Image: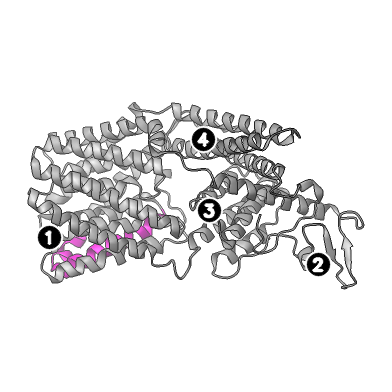
Amino acid sequence: MSSATPTSARVRRLPVVGALRLGRPSDVWFKPALSVVAAVAPPSLLLMTLGRLDLAPYTMAGSLCALYAHNRPYAARAKVLAWVILGMLGGLAVALVSASLTRNAVVLVTVGALLAAVQKAVCDATRVGPPAHVILTFVSSAALFVPQTPGQVPGHLALAAAAGVWAWLVGMAPAPLRPHGPERRATAQALNAAAAYAETARGGEEGAGARSAAYAAVHAAWQTLLAVRNRPSTTRRALERLVIRAEVALATPADADPARLRSWARAVRGTGRIPRTGDSRREEDGLRPDGVGSRPDGAGPCRTDGGARLDDDSLRRDGDLLRERDELVGVAAERAVAPRPLWSRLGPLAPVAVRSALGCALAGYVSLALGAERPYWALVTAASLYQANITLTWSRAVQRVVGNLVGVLLFAAVAPVAQLGPLALVLCILACNFGAEALIGRNYWLGSVCVTPLALLVTELPGYQPTGELVTGRVVDTLVGALVGFVAAVAVTNRRAGRRVERALTTVDRAREHAARVAADPSSTPAALEAARRGLAAAVVDLRATADAAAGEWWQRALPQERVVLAEQAAHRTLAATVRRRGLLPDSGTTSTYTYTEGASP
């Protein structure tokens, strides 16, 4: 266990200019951008041809599900997209039924706020990544203020479901061409981040930012690789070995080879063979796991564990390979543990749900008090603010306000073109969809510049409306939602989340120490070994879940992400020791020269 402690993260100054600084675009920014266009275009164009463009908001609700799960392996993506579509349909159903039963705006805002709270908590508990709950909240909140009759609800839900099925097909379309694309990308990002940290460490710099980014990338890579819980394929095992090599580079940056890490990252991004991680010279010499290899001259076998003296570099490489094997076995043990029930993950998120419900409700009520006809804009603005800490929440508020203000100016310029006809309107919507996803990776405010005219153009699908009224209403609701939402974030906190992470780290430490004692005791029974192994594996899974939940909160100290990753590494090696003790693996002490080859099983 590392003694590294998190640095203080007390809020002293809330940034403004820094919140608007542009970053580098995502390596795969075009994937969600093209996916959402492919998902939105066919249903919208079909409805336009039929002269029923007024129904396009319902099909668009299903089409927007194509934005999700681009970082998931395809086996996991299929399930996540299905659940997202069902969640979208559930929220939409509640909204449409409510709209058909009452036109009381206060009641509708209350329903929208409760839906937003549930969507936020469930998305956080299930770790559904960007755009998380925001799209679901936008869909359900907008539907609350569309006039409905009970007889129309089934048909509108059927349209959304059909578009959702099409979005599922769009999301899964790349699978036959690149079946391991998401895992490869996550592994490449971890290798590149480790290389960047190794370079800063060699240059004598502090490298705190690079180190934090590297640990975050490694953690994200493990999340991706462990998203599929069935027996890993040869390709996934090879990718796991590369992620472990990134971890080795983080542990000993002075000994890491950044050029080699980047070379592996480039090779992984393609569709070719996964690069080997062992000592290529000794692999070519035919080294076997038992320490017997073939002489380079083909004269016969030679002993590498006694007859020949290995230099320090070889011994260090052998130690890295043993660590690699041990952690792979630990990862396999963690994968075998069933995930925690959803209800147990929702419990700690109660403050998140209360904050979302309170902030969204108050934003909607204030908007109504100011005479707004579409208070859901204020509600969605409030729902979109809540981030990992108060500084980031403030930054998101600044980004949202700036992006929306610029966006309404863009809408004012685009509206005359969109009002030329139905085809022009659909093309403008598609362009805004693409622009939002292409730009939002550089900074949230830049994506909001396209999201704002998109939301305003969608309101014109049933019929054109005065541009001035739309612009004024959106500006007022944005300011109200950002102000009230930020106040709610300050008022309702979840300071227990930090203590839960500390307790989870302590639990992993104790479980690891217990498992190590059991594995080292020659008299331990198989039942005791199995109980210790399962207990430690469950503790590691709980640590990851707790850390992920805490990452959505803010408190006075920074999340100890480095300690979390180091605790996971140590636990994986201890898990390997318990498996070895049961005779499922050879003892690592029998040879110090084990080398992996492509496709070797741990």
Kindly report the distance in space between the C-alpha atoms of the residues bearing marks 1 and 4: 47 Å
Q: Which residue is mark 1?
A: 54
* Disc with the residue nearer the chain's start (1 vs 2): 1
**In the image, what residue type sits under mark 3?**
Leu
* Disc with the residue nearer the chain's start (1 vs 3): 1
- Tag 2 secondary structure: loop
Q: Which residue is mark 4?
A: 559
Name the residue rendered at 78%, 65% in the picture: 281
Instruction: Give percent across and percent down for residue 31.
Output: 40, 63
Kindly report the distance in space between the C-alpha atoms of the residues bearing marks 2 and 4: 46 Å
Q: Are marks 3 and 2 in contact (CB under 8 Å)?
A: no
Regarding residue 115, the answer to whether it shows in the image is yes
Q: Of 424 and 33, which appears nearest the observer?
A: 33
Q: Residue furthest toward the right?
A: 307
Give the magenta range: 413-442
Instruction: Give percent across and percent down for residue 565.
Output: 59, 41
Name the residue rendered at 54%, 46% in the picture: 336
Q: Are marks 1 and 4 in contact (CB under 8 Å)?
A: no
